[in-house]
Image (cartoon, grey):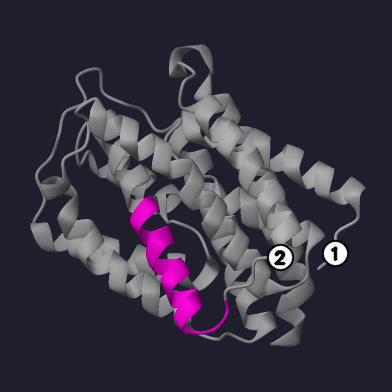
Amino acid sequence: MGLPIEGLILLCLGFFVVATLYSSVGFGGGSSYLALLALFLGGFFAIRSIALICNLIVVSGSTYLYFKEGHAKIRDFLPFVITSIPLAFIGASFRLEEHIFFILLGFSLVTSSLFLAWQTFSKKTPLERVKTYPKYLSYVLGGGIGLLSGLVGIGGGIFLAPILNHLRWDKSIKIAALASFFILVNSLSGIAGLVQGDMLQLPWKETLALAASVLIGGQLGIRISLKRLTPNGIKRVTALLVFVVGIRILVKYLPQVI
């Protein structure tokens, strides 16, 4: 891969900022890591591998804090992860052709950006009224998002959280905790799928530098109060970045299959 030092520094700075912002609002940053990597790298195995590793590093700290403070309970999250874990593994183990991967990546980035932007405009009720849904819906949502997560190399929380907030599945803090845990287990499953398919590619210099960047950013982000961050503004700017890169990827690779 061999990025020049200037490019690696810019990429590390971008990863640090993404990890800081995303961890402060309950996500790992996988979609934005993919967006940034797609601008600098061409090898899609390396893109998927690095994004999943960085996702894992960020959400590990967030998940620990959510459980420590009592916002997360395994039994409430099991219906989502029971189906997402095997399907994320299956998705990650697919050896996709390069143009197919980038088309899926482009569509997932555009979709995730719209979900993220839409979440900032959704109205919350003051009392955060919770609705009850049949348990099979949790299995279906977990499985579907898990499969997509494995295919493109993200944890899936950026899709899951807005949907659950819209459905009023539970209080927002618990949804954030679920999204963090969901990203954690799907990232682990996705990495296992890449290993099984002999597709895990982690150039040591770039991987270590980017891992260090998200570790510092993630630890900083989860310790910053949401009340002082204006998370909606952060999400809108991030959504715009991800949307633009997703469109750019689609413009480049869609003509190859049309």
Q: Is residue 96 above or below residue 36?
A: below
How far separated are the C-alphas under marks 1 and 2? Answer: 8 Å
Q: Residue at x 39, y 35 (%)?
A: 62
Q: Secondary structure at mark 2?
A: loop
Q: Which residues are magenta?
A: 184-199
Q: Is residue 198 above or below residue 30?
A: below
Q: Secondary structure at mark 1?
A: loop
Q: Is residue 185 above or below residue 122?
A: below
Q: Residue at x 63, y 51 (%)?
A: 33
| Helix, strand or loop: magenta stretch | helix
Q: Residue at x 79, y 72 (%)?
A: 252
Q: Which residue is mark 2?
A: 203
The answer to whether residue 243 is visible is no
Query: Residue 193 location in percent, x, y?
Result: 44, 76
Q: Earlier in the sequence, mark 1 or mark 2?
A: 1
Query: Label 1 is placed on what type of residue?
Result: Gly
Quadrant of image for the C terminus: bottom right
Quadrant of image for the N terminus: bottom right
Q: Quadrant of residue 3?
A: bottom right
Q: Which residue is mark 1?
A: 2
13 relative to 151 in the view: left or right: right
Query: Label 2 is placed on what type of residue?
Result: Pro
For the residues bearing labels 1 and 2, Cβ distance under 8 angstroms: yes
Q: Quadrant of residue 86?
A: bottom left
